[in-house]
Image: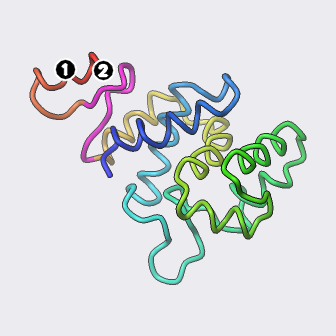
Amino acid sequence: MDLCTVRRSIVEPALLLLPAKMESLQAVVMLLAIGLQESRFEYRRQMGSGPAKSFWRAEQSGGMVTGLLRFRVESIRDLATGRCAVHGVVPAAPEVWNAIEHDDILAAGLAAPAAVHRSVPPSRAGQRVRRLGAVSPDLDSGACSHGEAAQRTELRKM
């Protein structure tokens, strides 16, 4: 899946359901960078017999699933359980872990709190996104930076 599609159909809808402080360019860049690193947005299940699911490679006992559901800060725990409720998923590790293999927006919404708190500056993460992705988004406008100049101009108007 190309990065423009990931951004528009998964990342942006996921961030809309999170607190405003998590809906930032930095969050978008980090979610794209992490997803590219982990799965290149090609596989929702770890290759081989690995236990990780979703484009962001969450394990059932890992931070994106069990870690958020049991987080020591109540507001973060509530964010995770609320996210599950919106997606009709019981907020228990096995159910969440199974759901994120097929629900990309839920997976991105659970990956976002970790992405927002990473210490990589947005400019470095953006460079990583551009380096790893075959198609890289223009992170300031939301338009893709591939194709002819006229096509990019049209995309930026959207």
- Report crowding for label 1: few under 14, some 14 to 19, many 20 or more residues within 10 A (C-alpha): few
Q: Is residue 77 left or right of residue 120?
A: right
Residue 141 shown in magenta: yes
Q: Main secondary structure of the magenta part?
A: loop
Of the 4 image quadrants, the one containing the C terminus is top left
Q: Which residue, given by chain and number where applicable, does mark 2 sit on?
A: 158
Task: Please state which of residues 10 and 145 is positioned toward the viewer in this rendering.
Answer: 10
Question: Who's the residue at 13% across and 33% down the image?
Answer: 147
Q: What's drawn in magenta, residue-wise?
A: 134-144
Question: Who's the residue at 55% across and 61% down the image?
Answer: 57
Question: Who's the residue at 43% across and 41% down the image?
Answer: 9
- Residue 141 x %, y %: 35, 19
Three-letter code, disc 1: Glu
Task: Please state which of residues 94 and 72 is positioned toward the viewer in this rendering.
Answer: 94
Q: Which residue, given by chain and number where applicable, does mark 1 sit on?
A: 154
- Residue 17 x %, y %: 64, 33
Which quarter of the figure has residue 60? Answer: bottom right
SS of the residue at dot 1?
helix
Q: Is residue 42 left or right of residue 108?
A: left
Three-letter code, disc 2: Met
